[in-house]
Image (cartoon, rainbow, N blue to C red):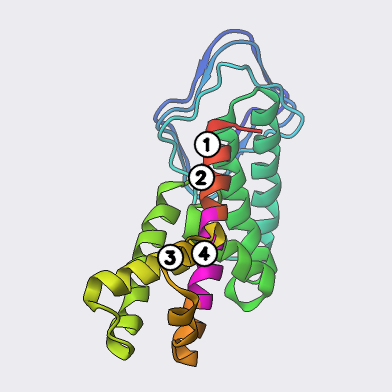
Amino acid sequence: KGANFQGTTFAKGATFKGATFVEWANFVNSEMKSQTIFDNAIFRHYPPLFYGAKLHEGTTWFNVVWPPAPKTREDAQLSVGAYERLKLEMDKLKKHEDELQFFALELRTRRVLVGKWLTFQGLAIGTYGLLCSHGRSYSRPVWLIGALCVLGAIPFLVYFGLAGWRGSIALSVANTLGIFGLRREFFSPSLIASLPWILKLVAGLQTVVGAALFFLFGLALRNRFRMR
């Protein structure tokens, strides 16, 4: 069930490796003076509470199973604060990978508070998670850019027949990389001007979505390698 370590001082190393916490794990105002291991632990319903706690820099969270997104606003309010505290503590200890993990869990939980897909903020958080795993995945935007290039070539091939697949893919890639100005380098302005309005719309959407995906790629790359 629950585990209450509130105000406890762990004078030596403490291991919770493989432990399953079905209810709350309360470490409020506790202090870890040596390495603390939570590897392979399972938090079934709630994240652990570390308000006012002092964690050791040797605290590890490898392969921890975190609880699913809360179903009620009350649980979400409690869980958001718990993840927020862990994120701040990991930032203090310069454990950047763990900080990113807790930030993603905090956003996933906060999305329940703001209404998931029913509000703009919930939609934005959900989309952010789908596109780049809340700023942690730089490979996902790359795959999406590739898919955008391939799928975007279909309208040009079907409606315009631009020199077969090669020409259609080339124009689709140029549109997706529009923020780099490549389209002007490889395609004449007269060709672009001759496109039907629907294809111009497709090209514009590709440029906008491509720019957004490149931004998310750069953001995830910066987050992953701690570039400033």
**Label 4 Cα crowd, 10 Å radius (few <14 / some 14-19 / many 20+):** some
> To which residue does mark 3 refer?
174
Badge number at residue 178: 4
Mark 4 or 1: in front is 4
Q: Measured along the vertical axis of the image, is residue 2 above or below residue 15?
A: below
Could you tell me the amino acid type at mark 1?
A: Arg
The mark total stands at 4
Could you tell me the amino acid type at mark 2?
A: Arg
State the residue at coordinates (46%, 46%). Answer: 138
Q: Helix or strand or loop: what does disc 1 sit on?
A: helix
Cβ–Cβ below 8 Å for labels 3 and 2? no
Q: Helix or strand or loop: what does disc 4 sit on?
A: helix
Residue closest to the eye, 191 or 60? 191
Q: Quadrant of the C terminus?
A: top right
Where residue 133 sits in the image (x, y, percent)?
Answer: 49, 52
Could you tell me the amino acid type at mark 4?
A: Gly
State the residue at coordinates (59%, 31%). Answer: 226
Q: Helix or strand or loop: what does disc 2 sit on?
A: loop
The alpha-carbon separation of the residues under discs 4 and 2 comes to 25 Å
> To which residue does mark 1 refer?
224
Q: Residues in magenta? A: 204-214
Badge number at residue 33: none
Q: Earlier in the sequence, mark 1 or mark 2?
A: 2
Cβ–Cβ below 8 Å for labels 1 and 2? yes
Q: Is residue 139 visible?
A: yes
Cβ–Cβ below 8 Å for labels 1 and 3? no
Q: Examine the residues drawn in magenta and state their main secondary structure.
A: helix
Q: Measured along the vertical axis of the image, is residue 185 above or below residue 49?
A: below
